[in-house]
Amino acid sequence: MLESKGRPNRLGLWGWLGGGRWGLERYLYTLHRLTGLGLLAYFLLHIVVTSSRAISPERWKAAMDSVTGPLFTVGEFLVFVAFAFHAANGIRLVLVELGWAVGKPIEPVYPYRTSVNFQRPLAVGAMILAVIVMMLGGLDFFVLD
């Protein structure tokens, strides 16, 4: 029998899936990775569908007819939502990684002031920007169409 080093997982499967005491930045990290993979999958599907144009106009029409309808409109909006989040969070990450958004380095003493005082408000601002872009996109997708 394998022995657990450190504290046992008393939460069971939820303790592994739920992340426990994750902070906002950890959730944004996970969502950034997932939206990146989703956008990659969409990009590959987009290449497959648009490459049918090189085969024949009939093949192109058949491919385009297979990806139309209200379900695909919602899917396209979800791709847009993923793009808006991924772009806003990516801008935040560039600002943090280059050191422009966190100020001068300080001694890492808990609670980490750079995270709480600089990175968290920047993360909230990036998410507000993403939500505004998502709402404008939803307006364009569903109301102004």
Image: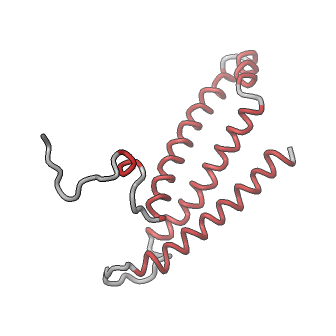
The outermost residue toward the front is 10
How did the renderer colour the structure?
A: secondary structure
In the rendered image, residue 35, in percent from the top left (x then y), is placed at 54, 47
**Horizontally, is 123 left or right of 9 in the view?**
right
**Horizontally, is 29 left or right of 56 in the view?**
left
Q: Residue at x 30, y 53 (%)?
A: 10
Q: Is residue 117 above or below residue 87?
A: below
Q: Nearer the viewer, residue 25 or 16?
A: 16
Quarter of the figure with residue 109: bottom left
The outermost residue toward the right is 144
Q: Nearer the viewer, residue 29 or 3?
A: 3
Q: Nearer the viewer, residue 52 or 105?
A: 105
Q: Which quadrant holds the N terminus?
A: top left
Q: Is residue 57 above or below residue 117?
A: above
Query: How many numbered marks does the figure carry?
Result: 0
Q: Residue at x 77, y 56 (%)?
A: 136
Q: Residue at x 58, y 69 (%)?
A: 124
Q: Which quadrant holds the C terminus?
A: top right
In the rendered image, residue 135, in percent from the top left (x then y), is placed at 74, 56
**Horizontally, is 137 left or right of 106 in the view?**
right
Q: Is residue 1 above or below residue 60?
A: below
In the rendered image, residue 13, in percent from the top left (x then y), is placed at 36, 45
**Horizontally, is 120 left or right of 14 in the view?**
right
In the rendered image, residue 49, in percent from the top left (x then y), is placed at 64, 27
Quarter of the figure with residue 2: top left
Q: Nearer the viewer, residue 58 or 138?
A: 138
Q: Residue at x 65, y 60 (%)?
A: 130
